[in-house]
Image (cartoon, rainbow, N blue to C red):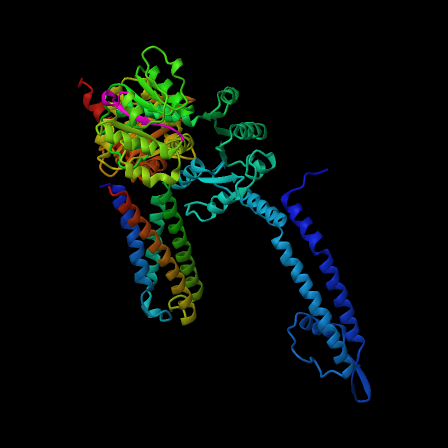
Amino acid sequence: MTPTSDLDRVTMIVLRYMRRPLFALLFVYSVGVMGMALMPGRVVDGETTYMNLFHAFYFFTYTATTTGFGELPNDYSDEQRLWAIFCLYTGAVAWFYAIGSLIRLVQNPHFIQAMEGFRFARKVRGNVDPFVILCGFGDTGSLLARGLSDHRMRAVILDFDPERIKALGVRDYTVAMPGLCADASTPKHLLAAGVEHPTCRALVALTNDDDVNLKIAVMARHLNPQLRVICRSTSARHEANLRALDNVTVVDPFEIFSQLVYWAIARSELHNLNAWFVGARGVELGVPVYVPRGDWILCGYGRMGRWINRCLREHGIGVRIIDPDVDTNLAREGTVMVQSNADLSALKEAGIHDAAGVIAATNRDADNLSTLLSVTELNPDTFRIVRQNSHENQVAFDAARADLVLQHSLTTARRILKLLISPLVQDLIDWLAQREPAQTKALVSRLQATMVKAPPHLWSVKLVPGEAPAVTDYLEAGGTVVLGALCRDARSFPEALPCGALAIRREGQAVMLPDEDFPLGVGDEVLFCGVKWVEPMLQATLHNPYTLRYVITGFDESRGYLFAWLEDRLRRRRSDARRNGRRPRP
Amino acid sequence: MNLERVVFGFFIILTLSLNYAFVAGGIESPAHHNVWILTLTIIVNLVAIGLKLGDRSQTGALLLASGLVAGLLLITARVVWIVADAGGGGAPGPGDMADIVSLATGALVANIIATAILVGDTLLSRR
């Protein structure tokens, strides 16, 4: 048995629904047309005329559809008129029956679903641009889709909730984002979404259910082993499972969130750089938020709280915990644990007056906001970090004026976006996180000098014939291209364009913060950060062999054969003259 | 300043000017069109094509293409002139003259495009 496609299903449903009305129409038409042809017409010159079959069909067509042009082509006899009455009633009834069935058909939910599936699959199949499959269109999914749209990257969206897919239709994305309401863990739907499509770049599993995410990741791996899979997972068991597969990246929202909290507390310069890279609102490069040192009060000790606690403790930061469900008997030596809601008394008990700051990290926005109010009342100087759970409460969190608002759906979406658009950026941030803060500061001051307050624009260039033909030709001809030369401004040689290379990936190995005289090779992927207009300028250098040669040598080379030949001769004569000049006279 | 750019720009713009000089005037009147100007246009155009040979950039390819189009049309116009003026001495009739001038006008369009590309490329590269 061959597998049925959506098109087969559509055809089947149409045939099943329309079989009866079509037969009814056929029957009524044949009886009416034949009857009309057999009815004796007016007597002309002593002979009875008959309507021919074509005219009868013409008559029936305009009668059955209740158009009624009158008695064409000649006036009818009474017999014909009698038959015309019969034709009118039967024809009109048959037509209404057929039209009614058709309307019922297009309202049939199975038909609508099959049509949508068919249209979706056709749209995905006909797509020629690179795209990402997004399974799950909740808070994180919609934020990620927005980010992808800002980078003009297409996404194909699967979600089981019809409301979310309907909401997708009214968004103003810059690129087409087809969506289908379907269970993403069914392989049929993954295939329709283009898992095997040649331009499919990655699959992102973002549903709220870890089991479903695991299922999607495993299905996708089986359907297309080369496809990159990014999977949201909060369960350690699944993570171990998924990490064993290659091409699968596990993203844990709690881990990312707690990492960001730690950076905000202890590595403010890195947090500042990271926020600037992702384009967070109101972030100025090189102006990190000042965070006081000391113990932190953590309100909420659920899954997120545990991650934050572990992460902060690993880096030697003291944590005092407030949670209604925490077991104070399990408290280790030297840790403060308060078993209560994070209200005024609990905050006092946890020692708000000598704490560096408060992290309100429960999974209820109302609790977090009320904790913020209590903290402001007790000690307005305390540094306040708050977790925002729902995207809809944005306005309330803006009004609360916390020192740092972290929304885990946003942080997760940004992390995935970075992995999809420019994975080297994340590698760079991770690399900097493991190094001394001085290294980050050096990079920040370098970027400050280059960018001069312009917003960051990150893009990566792969030195392959498709993307940088001039460079690959030059390298293959035996030349050397260093990074600094590539970044020179062809309009005002030898000044540099306001951009800098942050990282280079060569054969899977990443070189972070390469310096000016780093020699480039074919196949390198270079991550640039610069002012927006630099990208097209650099593109010109990468594509035009003459511009490339000019920025490398500072010498505008001849283009045509004639001038190249003339120049060659001139050079040879000059060098001959020099050689003759040096020769000692006998 | 680059000597090659000067020479190439000179030939491209000279082709355009000569081409216009030939085309200007009544389309059917042989008195308004000089066969020497047409011949000179062809020669200058061929030189411009020759100078562009060997350029590997995208604009170079486009300039070469427009030069080839102009050359093709101008040479066709010259051939029509020769055929129409088979006897020698006299000038082609009004019908043939119209053909010749309309072909040369086509070449004028190609030359305008070439000049526009040249000017645009120079302005965009801003060096």
A185 sits left or right of B60 in the view: right
Residue furthest to the bottom in view is A45
Does residue A357 show up magenta in the picture? yes
The answer to which of B35 and A194 lies nearer the viewer is A194
x, y percent for residue B123:
26, 47
Is residue A462 visible from the viewing direction of this image? no
Q: Is residue A357 above or below residue B114?
A: above
Would you identify the image quadrant in which residue A78 lies? bottom right
Q: Nearer the viewer, residue A323 or A54?
A: A323
The location of residue A162, given as percent across then percent down, is 53, 44
Residue in view at x 51 percent, y 28 percent: A210
Q: Which residues are magenta?
A: A350-363
Determine the residue positioned at 82% across, 86% down: A47
Q: Is A150 on the left or on the right of A576, as rendered?
A: right
* A268 over A566 or under it: above or below: above
Label count reads: 0
Can residue A586 be found in the magenta stretch?
no
User: Where residue A98 appears, x then y in whole percent?
Assistant: 68, 61
Identity of the residue furthest to the front in this view: A345
- Quadrant for residue A472, please give it: top left
Residue A116 vertical placement versus A494 (above, below): below
| Viewer can see residue A260 | yes
